[in-house]
Image (cartoon, helix red, strand yellow):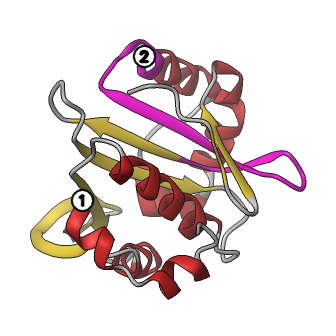
Amino acid sequence: MPKMELEFERLKIREITVNDASVIAQWKSGPLFRKMSTGSMTIINEGNQRQDIEKSLSQMNESYLMIIEKRSSQPVGYVRFNWMGSSQRYGWLRFGLGAEQGKGYMGEALAGIFQHLFQHETYRIDAEVYEYNTRSLKLLKSLGFQKEGVRRQAYFDEDQYFDIHVMGLLKSDWLEVSPQSRASLNIN
């Protein structure tokens, strides 16, 4: 996938660099982020995040993007795609925000990135969300994702099993998201 540099009303999207390892490690070490994404037992530090970024940058089947708030020029989150197959028409989505939650940044970033991807060769995007991550489920549904299934009790954390919701977004689903909805996400 060619480098992705995008700009929206409040945000810029750029490729991640190894210099972002410390902020990524800080975000992923927070208790809420750990519960929603990495799991409570995962060891997160700047060194392993630097290695992860270096590995990502060396692979053609991955896009790892930073979300930058334009006004402050500070990173507020990331979006990551693992592309399935050499055509990169089908990707698996992961995303996370730092402390800047509840401001609509992820909705704006994902909507703008999806608009860009679907205008090019992308046909399908998949995501998996833990059952208790209701904010992410609501966001993905607002962007046109369809619930395609449930992996029952497929995630174990803190002595408990949780379901994983399997979500999918086709290009045709994205095109059906109303212009008003896209306008509210600041991407038109």
Q: Which residue is found at the position 71% from the left and 38% from the top?
A: 23
The boundaries of the magenta stretch are 55-78
Q: Is residue 21 magenta?
A: no
What residue is pinned by disc 1? 156
Name the residue at the right extreme: 72
Q: Amino acid at mark 1?
A: Phe
Q: Distance between the Cα atoms at labels 2 and 1?
A: 26 Å
Relative side of 5 to 139, left or right: right
Relative side of 112 to 143, left or right: right
Q: Which residue is found at the position 68% from the left and 30% from the top?
A: 20
Relative to the observer, which residue lies in front, 85 or 75? 85
What residue is pinned by disc 2? 55
Q: Which residue is found at the position 39% from the left and 74% from the top?
A: 143
Residue 67 location (% of width, % of height)? 65, 48
Residue 120 appears in the rendering: yes
Look at the numbered disc 2 and give the secondary structure of its residue. Answer: helix
Q: Amino acid at mark 2?
A: Lys
Residue 168 appears in the rendering: no
Relative to the observer, which residue lies in front, 3 or 156? 3
* Figure check: 66 above or below 146: above
Residue 160 location (% of width, % of height)? 26, 69
Residue 22 location (% of width, % of height)? 70, 31
Name the residue at the top extreme: 58
Relative side of 151 to 26, left or right: left
* Figure check: 57 above or below 126: above
Using the rendered view, name the quadrant where residue 171 is placed.
bottom left
Image disc number at residue 2: none
* Figure check: 5 above or below 67: above
